[in-house]
Image (tube, rainbow, N blue to C red):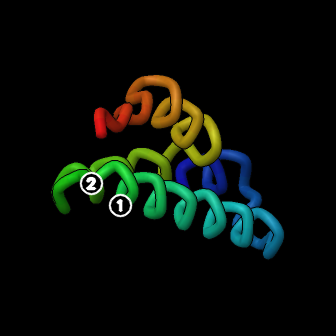
Amino acid sequence: MGLLILFDAARSWVLWLLLLAVLLLTLWECRERGYRLTVMLWWMSFVALTHAVGYLILRLVRPPRKDTN
């Protein structure tokens, strides 16, 4: 939402749809990694403010755990 407000693009339904898609990807990624609810909400709010850049940071900063089974 931060970038939508910054660029005054809040009227574009495509940008809102992309924001929703990135938030759903973030939710999926956090659940797959088994994060606690507070951590998941923090990532969701971070991605909501920074959009795709925030999602890319999530993917780069916290690489997935490797299964040892």
Task: Say if 64 sits above or below 16 in the image.
Answer: above
Residue 7, above or below 66: below
Q: Position of residue 32 (x, y in %)?
A: 39, 56
- In the rendered image, which quarter is residue 20 located in? bottom right
Residue type of the residue flagged with mark 2: Gly
User: Taking 62 as reference, is 24 left or right?
Assistant: right
* Mark 1 residue crowding within 10 angstroms, few (<14) / some (14–19) / many (20+): few
What residue sits right under mark 1 in the picture? 31
Discs 2, 1 touching: Cβ within 8 Å:
yes
Q: Give the secondary structure at mark 2.
A: loop
Tell me: 14 left or right of 58. Answer: right
**Residue 9 position (above or below residue 46):** below
Q: Looking at the picture, tell me which residue is in the foreground, 15 or 28.
A: 28
**Along the line of sight, the residue nearer the viewer: 27 or 1:** 27
Instruction: Name the residue furthest top.
Output: 61
Residue 5 % position (x, y): 61, 55
Name the mark on residue 22. Answer: none
Give the residue type at disc 1. Arg
Number of numbered discs: 2
Residue at 34% from the left image edge and 37% from the top image edge: 67
Q: Residue at x 44, y 62 (%)?
A: 27
| Residue position for label 2 | 34
